[in-house]
Image (spheres, coloured by chain):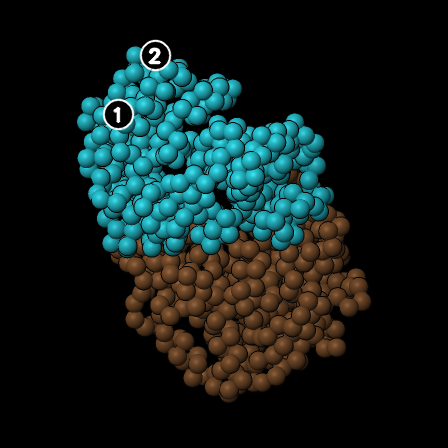
Chain colours: A brown, B cyan
Amino acid sequence: MSHFRVVATSGHARAGTLTTRHGEVDTPAFMPVATQASVKALSPAEVAGTGARLVIMNTYHLWLRPGPEIVHAHGGLHSFARWPHAIATDSGGFQAYSIAQRFRETPDGFELSSHLDGSRRLLTPEESLRVQVLLGTDIALQLDVCPPAGAPRRDVERALERTTAWAKRSLAARPDGQVLYGIVQGGTDVELRLRHAAELAALPLDGLALGGFSVGEAPARMHETLAAVVPNVDAARPRYLMGVGTPSDLVRAICCGVDLFDCVMPTRNARNGQAFVRGGRLVIKNARYKDDPSPIEPGCGCPACAGGFGRAYLRHLFQAGEILAHRLLTLHNLHHYQELVREGRAAIVAGEVEGWARSRLGDERGPAPLDA
Amino acid sequence: MSHFRVVATSGHARAGTLTTRHGEVDTPAFMPVATQASVKALSPAEVAGTGARLVIMNTYHLWLRPGPEIVHAHGGLHSFARWPHAIATDSGGFQAYSIAQRFRETPDGFELSSHLDGSRRLLTPEESLRVQVLLGTDIALQLDVCPPAGAPRRDVERALERTTAWAKRSLAARPDGQVLYGIVQGGTDVELRLRHAAELAALPLDGLALGGFSVGEAPARMHETLAAVVPNVDAARPRYLMGVGTPSDLVRAICCGVDLFDCVMPTRNARNGQAFVRGGRLVIKNARYKDDPSPIEPGCGCPACAGGFGRAYLRHLFQAGEILAHRLLTLHNLHHYQELVREGRAAIVAGEVEGWARSRLGDERGPAPLDA
């Protein structure tokens, strides 16, 4: 059974279906981030209630705590974290680089010290895959090398070479039936991106992720690069844009043919008091909301808006440091992101992705509330 | 219509019904604490799901932020905080004393500076009642003077005198139909408690609260004092033991004839990783739970236990600082407290409160898990 099929296209954009051991996932899809096996502030039922059928968890964090053996003994992440739908796991490479201490890259993998207890660890392509398999992931990601924005070309080329080698080692270590995605690097260099995408497409990977975006480059550079690269990435496999982005980033990337996204923005910004609404963002602590009984976004069907929680109450909860503020804003933001990909899919199926994108991007210059 | 009626007694214990503008409340009742108009970590629907039909909010906090005028403009606390059931509010006196800065007691009331912005404020019996009325409370509490544990007798006597005077001023300021409780002080001195209870019972107050317990005295002293005092407090009015306590404190106080309780213990301890179970308390971070797939309390019907969340996952969430740990433990603990008062009421109605109390108190010396 194929992991992915395209059911409709509109321009470069595609509507598709991912088939996993834990159900089908409509694409374009946005994966809420459940770093430590919990989408921050929400229950699994609430996450499913936003429409999400695929979340992404973090191999580095779960490797260190509680440890993959404990999760495995509990029947894997689905059972451990009470999430019955599909789960992807990243490789842990990005966290090894950004969070761990005494990090060193070698041809074999990453040497590092745990940020929790300082213990010395070795994260190889094989170890990352072993951990992901123990966790019971539906979609594993290969360990890759992600050069920082603005890295010299020879560093980027070395990163591509090593990432391809690690993709092969990951494939060699892959158990039967394990879905595994490769990761295309190359920064904002279109030629390198295309070369690397072709290299990985020659391997029997189930999906092709685009790593190394949103790492400090200008958003316009990312959009240009995606427009030149994505339509040329093997169309038979799902294309996953890692760690991106704002609602308008998603709209633009969907138009280029991206199928899958993840980003901490809707959940993290919620905990910082920022709500995504059509037309911009609402900063709940602003004094203008202290008397405002209207919901975050009139007409929105999320539990915060449809539940009658007003901006003045949300502002009060946020100012008072109440957990309920984080919960309600997170519910709203994830609902906003899921609604965006649902709308995008419907527009693709209807063959009208361009009109939809114009309308969604036009929103961004639209009327208030636009606090940020 | 009477605010309270007793429907059954067993020994000194009573089962009753409070009638409020927002529904009836079975007693004995435990009020979850929603200090800043939110039961910490829970949604209103979740609080109602534990069986609670009455919560207590805090006049001092809501007076300073968001301010009673804003809450009033939103239709009162029920509408503002989306809680359709009954609400009690304390007077704010305890917080004025314990949280505010530059506190000074005068015959007129409490002078203080806001702990939020240092603004100078005067909390009089009339101002406290005015704020509670603007908040739309179903049950207001008079402003009282609460001497610390071990205060000299003449200080306690002065506190009683002033509290009675302030009860009279509160009654004079009370709008028609506003339910108002007086507060009996007197520390652990039975004679002073009885004298003050009789003084307040001579006034047209709707309920008699017992303040100044759990302020540092030994638990056994509190239990002795309650046993001598409570059965002699006017039986026609609800008796409310403020700020108490552990499950076994509740069992003992119910046996003395207390009808109403509030305490931060189930919610605060949850956020510190402590779960109340029959037989004791479970400290979720303990290493013994790292591999344990069982729910907090097998057989418990709360959303955490019935939802299949295991101790190992809860421990992981707690260690990782995930909000979901606080939510699930809070749900469990409030469920435990509500189950206790439901059971107590059924035992009173059945005329078997003593057997129930023996069985519940026996639990406390019972089998593991008993981590604390």
Residue A149: mark: none
Chain to which mark 1 belongs: B
Residue found 56% across the figure and 33% down from its top: B353
In the displayed structure image, the side of residue B122 where residue A52 appears, left or right: right
**Residue B176: x percent and y percent?**
22, 44
**Residue A286: x percent and y percent?**
30, 54
Q: Is residue B271 visible?
A: no
What is the quadrant of residue B273 in the picture? top right
Determine which residue is flagged by label 1: B164
What amino acid type is highlighted by mark number 2? Answer: Pro
The quadrant of the image that shows the C terminus of chain A is bottom left
Considering every residue shown, the one lying at the far bottom of the view is A351
Residue found 65% across the figure and 73% down from its top: A24
Vertical side of A1 occupied by B196: above or below:
above
Could you tell me how far apart the alpha carbons at marks 1 and 2 are, in whole angstroms?
19 Å
In the displayed structure image, the side of residue B78 where residue A49 appears, left or right: right
Residue found 74% across the figure and 55% down from its top: A75
**Residue A170: x percent and y percent?**
75, 62
Q: Earlier in the sequence, mark 1 or mark 2?
A: 2
What amino acid type is highlighted by mark number 1? Answer: Thr
The quadrant of the image that shows the N terminus of chain A is bottom right
Q: Nearer the viewer, residue B316 or B275?
A: B275
Vertical side of B133 occupied by B199: above or below:
above
Determine which residue is flagged by label 2: B152
